[in-house]
Image (tube, grey):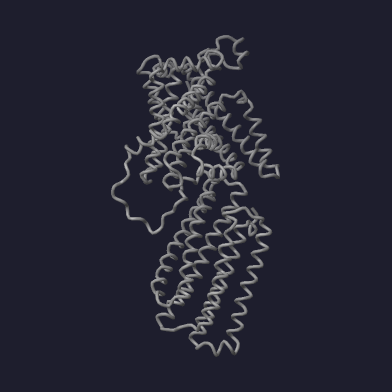
Amino acid sequence: MDWKHIVFQSIGGLGLFLMGMKIMSEGMQKAAGSGLRKTLNFLTTNRILAIIIGFFVTAVIQSSSATTVMAVGFVNATLMTLRQAIGVILGANIGTTVTGWIVTLKIIKFSMPMIGLGVFIKFFSKSEKWKYTGEVIFGFGILFLGMQTMKMGFAPLRESPEFIAFFMRVDGLSFWSILLGLGIGAITTFIVQSSSATIGITIALASQGLLNFEGAVSLILGENIGTTITANLASIGGNYQAKRTAIAHTLFNVFGVFIVLSFFYPFVRIVESLVPGLADMTVKTADQAALYGAAINTKPLIGKHIAMAHTLFNVSNVVVFAFLVPLLARVCEKIIPEPKKKKKPRAVEFSHIDFNLIDTPALGIAQTEKELMVMADRVSGSSDLVKEIINDGENRRELCDKVFRKEKIIDEYQKYITEFLVTLSSSALSESDANHIGNYMTLSHNLEKFADHLEHITLIYDKIDRQNIRLPGEATEIIDKIFTENENFFKKSLRPFSEKIDAQDFMDRSQVLNRRVKKIIKEAKIAHLSGTGKKMFKNSEAIHYMDILNYLDGMRAQAYNIAEVTSGTKYNI
């Protein structure tokens, strides 16, 4: 027996399977980018939809582990409650069963035409949607080719007495063989880090007659335990709520496995009754081979039975635990209690962005938008303080210190958001997602520059206060007037984030506002340089006044830039 051929063929097939799943997943994500963002909005506002959304997201990205890791990240970022996350995990467990059905489809023999068709659509379509569709078809083709290659790799093992003897132990006919199947399934899934891939391997082995149905079911139960390890790894370093979410996933799957183990054989019989034909029917004659389109000594019907067992396990598990979510949450809270000693809060707490979202760009972009709004609120808070500084000479020192502290935090936001978006940009992106990333990087820069101008104005007032200089009352009135105009312009420039607008009408209004503020600043500068201005100021006061007008003009320019970005007119979205 050529073991090198078997190993190379099997590993190569698994590699093709995983790569096909990745390409198909990325194509689906890019095609459904805006839909995933809308889904996330539902998720954060309606707990009842959590199970449906967990199913939907997993069906799209073809990875329950990824969905669960996202849920852990959302809870860690306080975006989602523990109970909402449990609902998402329940839905994800149903969504992951889609893969098992995909690999049992008869179209596996059309893998090569699908690869060709996918490439043709990808390279010759002008529409972005069609290009992504081509990627999905190509991914399906590679996935099916990998499945076919794995089956061919495992085929010679039907003649290996040692291999047959090993898998005869995983026959599900005794308690110990069921436990062995559980262990193998769990360990394999942990190593491969994909329950979908492990199910593909199980179907490939069983289809070649190397596993009976009971043994395959025991492996599937183990795979459902093994897939929980990913979420627990993701929760390391997270807060106690993230750890509770990971524990909830583990308890849900482990308890579900124990429930099925308590009536293992009736469960197997139920599955067999739901799928036509005998699971362990083996092709023995040439007529049967022609009828089923399968080789002699293979099991052509067992794949669908395995897919049904996986689906029935997860669906029934969800039905049971959907009513026990509050109880499951309380159990997790008992296992992972809230820390008694509160950690000292960081200078910056990022509420929405989590690097676990990198693998799902559409959701990462949606969360970046929320973090940008938090950043904008901080900039607005600094603006309120600067307005007080302009009009309040008594508490100016204290107010200046607050602005300087806030500026450091805003700089951290800009740095963190940019770092996240740069990392996100390395993912497979649709054109729309790529444009959003470019826009949001620009927006974080514009917000930071607006805050810089606020800091510069504050530095001037701090300096004149220390030098016991006082600007004339008329100058203060002009500065206050222009500053108020800029504040209003800044707040209006962020409207597209919170309400639906007509982009062209919004920019027309922004241009009018921009020209008005620019005109007021220009008139103030002209007046300052005239004879009236020279009489009003001493030399040192005049320099500071002119500098403040320049920074006010910078605020105006940044507010207009922000309006262009938020409306989507600066770059084409």
Is 41 placed left or right of 113 in the picture?
Answer: left
The total of numbered circles placed on residues is 0
**Which x, y percent locates residue 333?**
34, 39
- Is residue 273 among what the camera can see? yes
Above or below, 424 relative to 384: above
**Which x, y percent locates residue 451?**
49, 66
Q: Nearer the viewer, residue 109 or 470?
A: 470
Above or below, 329 relative to 491: above
**Which x, y percent locates residue 443?**
55, 59
- The residue depicted at 42 percent of the width and 80 percent of the height is 465
Q: Nearer the viewer, residue 285 or 380?
A: 380
**Which x, y percent locates residue 139?**
59, 35
Q: Nearer the viewer, residue 110 or 539?
A: 539
Q: Quadrant of residue 184?
A: top left
Which residue lies most toward the left here?
Answer: 341
Q: Which of 566 and 132 is in front in this view?
A: 566
Above or below, 124 relative to 278: below
- Is residue 4 among what the camera can see? no
